[in-house]
Image (tube, grey):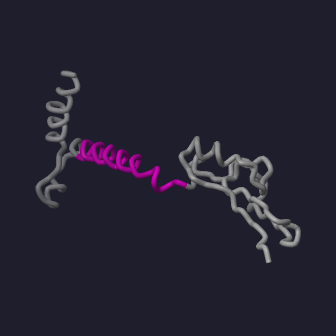
Amino acid sequence: MEFLSKIVRVHIPDYLNSVPVPDSFGGFLDLTAGQWLHLFAFSGTVAAAVYMSVKPYLDKKDQKDQLVNLRIQKESSKVVNMVDIEDLGNKVCYCRCWRSKKFPLCDGSHAKHNEDTGDNVGPLVLKRKDV
């Protein structure tokens, strides 16, 4: 723990004090090539750290774990299922979790999905109204 304490209390402040940040804009003109290099290295490191911290929030589309549909009709650009309303019968349940092996019909896979992810998705239930 002493090692970490020394880094935080001694080395980091010493390094930050060594970064050549001028007091005014005119001071940038007086920097040497070595000081510019030091300043660019420090700035690049800070920029990279900020970028890596923010990147997960900016690129959610690129993250595989953000996909809803993991396996159904992946060769299609869009999954569309058409159902004739006359063929529905008295009650039908449609999958909304995209995990059903009988997709687009629900097979109860949402229960495991909800347990694994903490989600609360359930089926779309269509029921014929008694007249």
Q: In which quarter of the image is residue 38?
A: top left
Chief secondary structure of the magenta span?
helix
Instruction: Please tell me which residue lies in front, 80 or 62.
Output: 80
Instruction: Give residue 2's position: percent from left, percent from top.
Output: 18, 21
- Side of 32 relative to 73 (left or right): left
Instruction: Please tell me which residue lies in front, 36 or 12.
Output: 12
Instruction: Give residue 31's position: percent from left, percent from top.
Output: 18, 49
Which residue is pictured at 83% across the width and 67% down the height? Answer: 83
Instruction: Give residue 24's position: percent from left, percent from top.
Output: 13, 59
Q: Quick check: is 77 in the magenta stretch? A: no
**Placement of 71 over or under 3, stated as above or below:** below
Residue reaching furthest right? Answer: 87
Which residue is pictured at 19% across the width and 46% down the height? Answer: 32
**Placement of 51 over or under 8, stated as above or below:** below
Q: Quadrant of residue 127?
A: bottom right
Which residue is pictured at 17% across the width and 26% down the height? Answer: 6
Residue reaching furthest bottom? Answer: 131
Q: Quadrant of residue 92?
A: bottom right
Q: In which quarter of the image is the N terminus?
A: top left
Residue reaching furthest top? Answer: 2
Region rendered in magenta: 36-60
Which residue is pictured at 56% across the width and 50% down the height? Answer: 119
